[in-house]
Image: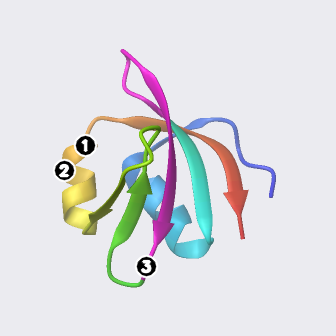
Amino acid sequence: MTPNRSKVKSQELLRLARQYKYIEASLNNGFLNATHLVRFGGRKYFDTGIDSQEISWTEKEFLSFYEKSFWKIDQIIS
């Protein structure tokens, strides 16, 4: 799927992750850009960063950690 190249907030990223199999997105927090692969596993979100470490988050944890972050959607895999 061709993604919308605009920046989205973390809440919108999680909405997309619930809808599609994988979301590849670049984290843009003003200081760095880092690619993440985000997927939803039914109860938790799984976030794999550029270090290949997968972190599982509840929605509340993810939104708290990435509270002021914006994401550029690079690829959506359905």
Residue position marked by numbered label 2 in the rendering: 64
Does 71 appear above or below 59?
above
Q: CA distance from mark 2 to mark 3?
A: 19 Å
The magenta stretch is 27-41
**Tag 1: amino acid:** Glu
Mark 2 vs mark 3, foreground winner is 3
| Residue under the image location 47 percent in, 55 percent down | 12
As drawn, is 67 to the left or to the right of 76?
left
Residue position marked by numbered label 3 in the rendering: 41
| Residue under the image location 70 percent in, 49 percent down | 75
Whether the residues at callouts 2 and 3 have beta carbons within 8 Å, the answer is no
**Tag 2: amino acid:** Ser
- Residue 31 is situated, as x and y percent measured from the top left of the image, at 36, 15
Residue 31 is inside the magenta segment: yes
Considering the numbered disc 1 on the image, is that residue within a helix, a strand or a loop?
A: loop
**Tag 3: amino acid:** Gly
Residue furthest toward the right? 2
Whether the residues at callouts 1 and 2 have beta carbons within 8 Å, the answer is yes
As drawn, is 8 to the left or to the right of 44?
right
Residue furthest toward the top? 31
Say the numbered circle drawn on residue 26.
none
Residue position marked by numbered label 1 in the rendering: 67
Q: CA distance from mark 3 to mark 1?
A: 21 Å
Residue 74 is inside the magenta segment: no
Does 42 appear above or below 71?
below
Q: How many marks?
A: 3
Circle 2 Cα neighbour tier, 10 Å, few/some/many (<14 / 14–19 / ≥20): few
Considering the numbered disc 2 on the image, is that residue within a helix, a strand or a loop?
A: helix
